[in-house]
Amino acid sequence: MILEGGGFKFEVVEGWGRVPEDLHLGPDIPGVATDSQDRVYIFNRSEHPVAVFESDGRFLGTWGEKAFSGRPHGITITPDDIVWCTDDLDHTVRKFTLDGKLLQTLGTLNQPSDSGYVPNPTHSLESIKRGAGPFNRPTKVALAPNGDLYVTDGYGNARVHHFTSAGELIKSWGEPGEGPGQFNLPHAAWVHTDGRVFVCDRENSRVQVFRPTGEHLSTWNMAGRPQGLTIDKDNHVFISVMLWIAGARTLAGKLMTESAPSHICICDLEGNLLAKWGATNYGEMDSFVSAHGMCIDSQGSWYVVENGQHGLKRLGISRPSYPSWRKLARVK
């Protein structure tokens, strides 16, 4: 299958990333990242949290079997091959080597910061009363060109935390709400080479752009809920977007008045849409159920992962063979 539009062309690589028959990953696959050799690291909620593949899909192994006690969420690999993983239920951000050796932990295990958030089965954000320190259910790490780290702290907080490369807190910003600089689930971030910080403000259905020091610059409103964002070397902004369902409510309690399918898209640096793929043919390869984590490798290939089976279940669809990770190979 070919996805083409806006001068971009990708081929869906059928059957990419097969694992041994006795190894079970998922069913939720929230994160994916590539290292300097274009090996692919799939971060998932199973007994084998990190699964590693060659770029051609050959399975290499797993790690992290005893490293995570909560709910794996985001994975980021820096150019010097440091792996940062967030666990949004045990309130930590962990630093690893490529083979899974733990180097550092940010946050205190199982001790959330005081944002007023009350854990609940529906993951509602409505109990969040204030922005708080690190962390209350963190979601993703972003790396700045100078080595600083930005962490979105989203399911139980409404903040972005700015750290030095050594993990020392510099500044936090954000509070619950819909105004500029406020958040309802900061879900992921990316730092451009010019220092601007792009944040997926998921339940507000927008991307917000900030100066490195947290001052608000602009807002891109979207149809759907942006979950992941990456900017390539050509300044194209790749975004994965969760669906809207008319009549349902966001985690912030806001009514969705229209429907929009989960999709992936490419924008320019001002937020202008260049290309978009995704339909309502849920469970098929031309559609996405809940496009979540994503990354771009050095060859321009686009990896997208989903909480696929849970998303299908919510839609009342049974597709046991539906792949929760997908490689879209860039066609030059």
Image (tube, rainbow, N blue to C red):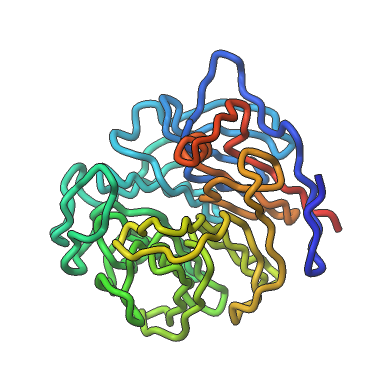
Taking 97 as reference, is 237 left or right? right
**Which residue lies most toward the top here?**
22
Total numbered circles: 0
Question: Is residue 100 placed above or below 95 in the rendered structure?
Answer: above
Q: Position of residue 33 (x, y in %)?
A: 56, 47
Figure quadrant of residue 186:
bottom left
Question: Is residue 62 placed above or below 253 in the rendered structure?
Answer: above
Q: Position of residue 11 (x, y in %)?
A: 80, 48
**Which residue lies most toward the right here?**
332
Give me the residue at 29% from left, 37% from top: 70
Give me the residue at 62% from left, 34% from top: 323
Q: Position of residue 134 (x, y in %)?
A: 24, 59
- Pick the front one: 309 or 166: 309
Figure quadrant of residue 114:
bottom left
- Pick the front one: 266 or 332: 266
Figure quadrant of residue 131:
bottom left
Question: Is residue 303 placed above or below 151 in the rendered structure?
Answer: above
- Pick the front one: 124 or 80: 124
Give me the residue at 36% from left, 61% from top: 152
Q: Position of residue 248 (x, y in %)?
A: 39, 56
